[in-house]
Image (spheres, grey):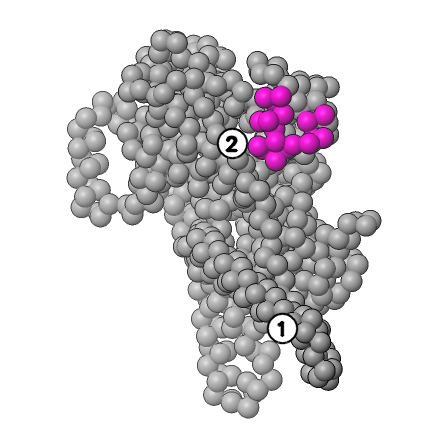
Amino acid sequence: MELARFTALERHYGAKDVFAGISGVIRDGDRIGLVGPNGAGKSSLVRLLVGLDEPDGGTIVRARDRPLAYLAQDAADSGPQTLRAAFDDALASGRAQEWEMRATLNRFDFAEVDLERPLSQFSGGQRTRALLARTLLEQPDWLVLDEPTNHLDLDTVRWFENFVRRDPRAFLIVSHDRYFLETVATEIWELDHGELQTYDVQPGRAYTMYVEERTARREQQRRDYETATTERKRQRAVIDELRTHGSHNYSAVWSREKAFARVDAVDAPRAERRKIAVALTAARRATGGPAIEVKGITKAYDHPLFSDVTATFTRGRRVAIVGPNGSGKSTFLRILGGELAPDRGSIRYGTGLRTASYAQSSVDDLPAGATAAEAVMRMGVTGEEARGLLGRLNLGGDAGDKPVEAFSGGERRRIMLARLMAQRADCLFLDEPTNDLDIASREALEDVLADYGGALFVVSHDRYLLKRLGERVVAIRDGQAEVIDADYEMYERRLHEPPPAPKERAARQATAEQKTAPGRRVAHETKLDTGRRKRAVADAENRVAQLDAERTVLEAQFTASELYDDPQRVVELQHALERNRAESAAAMEGWERAAAALE
């Protein structure tokens, strides 16, 4: 069933055309990823589709009695005052129950005491999770989400991926997260240069298929343009030849002129956005010696972040630092970079090592009041060199004379990159370098970093970047930092390995118990028991949700007018609905028992 159809849609801001003449359809079960460069109009399009804004031209038709939910990109900045207020908004719709709110609290890793906390006290990631939880709790028939994975840690993004992939509803999701798109999308919409192109893809390799098809389409467009241009030149030459040699067959010349005028010119291929044409240069060629050695480093604030970390990181190696939000990734990176002292332990740098940092707070790090060129010059280069670096980052011309405050978040990231290049360091510390960058800029930055010859330490939630760059992994979680001698792809694969068979698990547990001291054994068993109870709650929630979905399908079948021409089918559906309701009641009782046991 169609949930929304838009035709010949137009949006203008003053004299600027954002897009014109675009059309599309959203159907039940679609999982659409909307991509395009920053400023292409993606957020403008979704605001039109959900009815917040009116189009300047064209039509939008939405299905009646099919409620939708919308999560805006900046919703975390202007949402409800408390977590309870956010959930009360969802409960007010009447489509969700109190028990579902409690289950959602647990699913999104919130505690009961968090309900009364002002959202302003939560981190950006927690606010995003809270509003995403509210959106799902509203139980809409279809969802429009604008950058929902922004500020989410990898654990939450993985959970959200699995949720979307298994959910039968329709989703339209604006995202720059290529790994997320790769996993969940059944269709990719690309909005660029005012045009909307659609691509049918398959979950699991959706983004890969989109890139391959886009490349093939553009190559075909180039060939069609060249063929058509050659043919038009040939026809024009024939007409000119007839005119030049004074042909008396004016009728033939006139006929050819008319035929030539009726031939539509083939559009020229779309001009590709210029990629970042720059390279990071290390102060010297990478060698196999140590870049950084850490021995027993420990750091804690109100709780331990990591302790007794010992490792040697060699020159030229690329290290991915991963973990949940708040686990201490940025703290570990700052300790490695010498910006923060550990509580205990030591750090030793290779002889003559030159370092540079690319911080998460890049906007704050840029000198206030300085122009882009001046900000780069302060890294020790001439004005000409600074403008050259900015130009190669697509910030040439008059952009160098604009104050840094006048640039967008993504553009300021590029100014920070120019400052980074000006330092010619042979060891880089990067904290979320792809934040605020669109897909094209992310891929360009990856190309730059992939060709860099020095040591690289990167904290990021961008799994595409980590997969390409991460040759070694530092995983920080639950107060421990594990240094893994494997690349990020292998680390990610290990996270998704199926659990061991019961016999193998029992053998592992027996071995672990033999090695565990009595005091630690009690704590270990308590942790296992808590984990089992949490899984029981999650399994019960899934069973309730499955039965709810089945009941929705059954109830929908009763609305078909042709059903009542078959009395036997009506009886069968009634029996199926009764069984479903009985199983739902039992499942709810099971959920309540599991939830009580967990509490």
- Find residue 353 and report its image quarter: top left
Query: Could you tell me if residue 353 is visible in this image?
Result: yes
Q: Nearer the viewer, residue 305 or 589?
A: 305
Q: Which of 499 and 575 is in front in this view?
A: 499
Q: Give the range drawn in magenta.
A: 384-401
Q: Name the residue under label 2.
A: 278
Local secondary structure at mark 1: helix
- Residue 516 at x, y = what percent? 22, 25
Residue type beneath disc 2: Val
On screen, residue 550 above or below 544: below
Quadrant location of the N terminus in the rendered image: bottom right
- Find residue 487 and report its image quarter: top left
State which tag comes first along the sequence, 1 or 2: 1
Q: Is residue 544 located in the magenta-colored stretch of the structure?
A: no
- Residue 403 at x, y = what percent? 72, 25
Question: Residue most toward the right?
Answer: 14
Question: Residue at the spot x=50%, y=20% of the render?
Answer: 357
- Residue 24 at x, y = what percent? 63, 65
Question: Residue most toward the bottom?
Answer: 565
Local secondary structure at mark 2: loop
Question: Residue most toward the front?
Answer: 245
Q: Mark 1 points at which residue?
A: 238
- Find residue 65 and report its image quarter: bottom right
